[in-house]
Image (cartoon, rainbow, N blue to C red):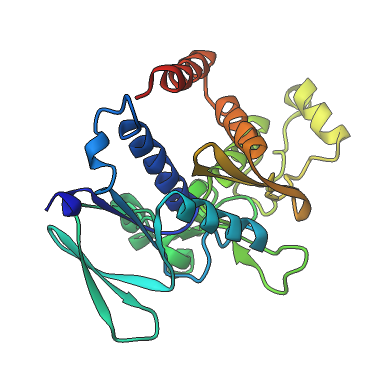
């Protein structure tokens, strides 16, 4: 019974599932370490399962980094189960089945954590029910055009609704791909789309037009430094959104991380280990909204490293 209560299943082998498994390993390693761990007696009873429906963890990363992620988690004692679907979640068990077979396995446990993607929130479903059928994108998301505008029931309302981030199905064609694919639901995409839409609104483009253009103004209204600057740069028409990928990061536990550094579709280099962990933490700190948060997080890391959790 104690082993069941200390068995945790993480469903999903993407960045969220891999990082969560690594953080759980760090947490239990500190709580059960000798000689000062508070729960040393539980060390042999703890088990972390990572269940993934694909054949490789972190499918968005290169092959060498996928293999490194698998090896890093397994070396920490994580039981990685690939090519397996979650069939049922019960009060104190889960049922899983290997893809392509009818075999179902029941695993008693205490906690199941879903890290394999989220369903749209009720607001998105309600909005889609009031939009044309062409607004329905893959995975319950809202289809948008190059300027993040979604289809609307009437021409008068077109350009008044924008969809960004996880709810937006923005299809873009990569350099070496033959057909467009929806952009991933990541913070990089959401952040760049938010900045893009904010620029268009600040510049005053007429969003009802395709492409959006600066509105026609009278001579007395037309002279403004912003308008002159935009026209001089050839931005009288708003350019479409282009996502610039800056790479992928993932933490695997025990101060090991994976970095796939790229600019757009051009890969630069991949590396893993302690140096990658330093970059991962640096990016994490740099993305905080305020210097206060940066200081608090850095202090928490230092305190945990010095005194434990």
Residue 140: x percent and y percent? 40, 63
Residue 15 against residue 229 in the figure, above or below: below
Quadrant placement of the C terminus = top left
Residue placed most toward the observer, 158 or 190 = 190
266 left or right, relative to 62: right
Residue depicted at x 45% and y 59%:
13
Front-lying residue, 150 or 271: 271
106 up-or-down from 192: above or below: below
| Camera sees residue 182 | yes
Left or right of 213: which side holds 150? left
Looking at the picture, tell me which residue is in the foreground, 101 or 245. 101
Q: Residue at x 72, y 24 (%)?
A: 221
Instruction: Name the residue at 42% across, 69% down.
Output: 53
Residue 136 in view of the camera: no
Q: Please, is residue 236 above or below residue 87 in the view? A: above
Please give the count of numbered marks on the rendered protein.
0
Residue at the farthest front position = 35
> Residue 279 in the image: x percent, y percent?
65, 33
Q: Is residue 59 above or below residue 235?
A: below
Q: Position of residue 270 (x, y in %)?
A: 72, 49
């Amino acid at each position: 019974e104690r082993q069941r209560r200390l068995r945790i299943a993480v469903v999903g082998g993407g960045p969220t599932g891999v990082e969560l498994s690594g953080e759980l390993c760090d947490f239990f390693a500190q709580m059960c370490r000798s000689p000062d761990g508070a729960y040393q007696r539980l060390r042999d009873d703890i088990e972390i399962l990572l269940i993934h429906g694909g054949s490789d963890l972190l499918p968005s990363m290169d092959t060498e980094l996928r293999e490194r992620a698998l090896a890093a988690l397994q070396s920490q004692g994580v039981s990685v189960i690939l090519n397996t679907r979650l069939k049922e979640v019960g009060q104190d068990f889960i049922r899983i089945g290997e893809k392509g077979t009818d075999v179902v396995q029941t695993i008693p446990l205490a906690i199941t954590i879903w890290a394999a993607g989220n369903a749209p929130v009720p607001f998105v479903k309600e909005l889609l029910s009031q939009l044309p059928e062409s607004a329905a994108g893959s995975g319950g998301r809202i289809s948008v055009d190059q300027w993040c505008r979604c289809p609307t029931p009437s021409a008068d309302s077109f350009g008044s609704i924008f969809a960004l981030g996880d709810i937006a199905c923005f299809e873009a064609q990569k350099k070496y791909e033959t057909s467009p694919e929806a952009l991933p639901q990541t913070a990089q995409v959401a952040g760049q789309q938010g900045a893009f839409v904010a620029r268009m609104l600040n510049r005053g483009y007429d969003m009802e037009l395709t492409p959006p253009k600066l509105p026609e103004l009278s001579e007395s209204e037309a002279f403004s430094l912003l308008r002159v600057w935009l026209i001089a740069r050839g931005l009288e028409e708003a350019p479409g959104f282009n996502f610039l990928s800056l790479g992928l990061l993932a933490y695997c536990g025990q101060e090991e991380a994976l970095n796939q550094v790229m600019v757009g579709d051009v890969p630069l280099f991949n590396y893993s280990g302690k140096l990658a962990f330093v970059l991962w933490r640096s990016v994490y700190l740099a993305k905080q909204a305020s210097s206060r948060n940066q200081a608090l997080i850095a202090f928490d890391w230092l305190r945990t490293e010095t005194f434990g959790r």
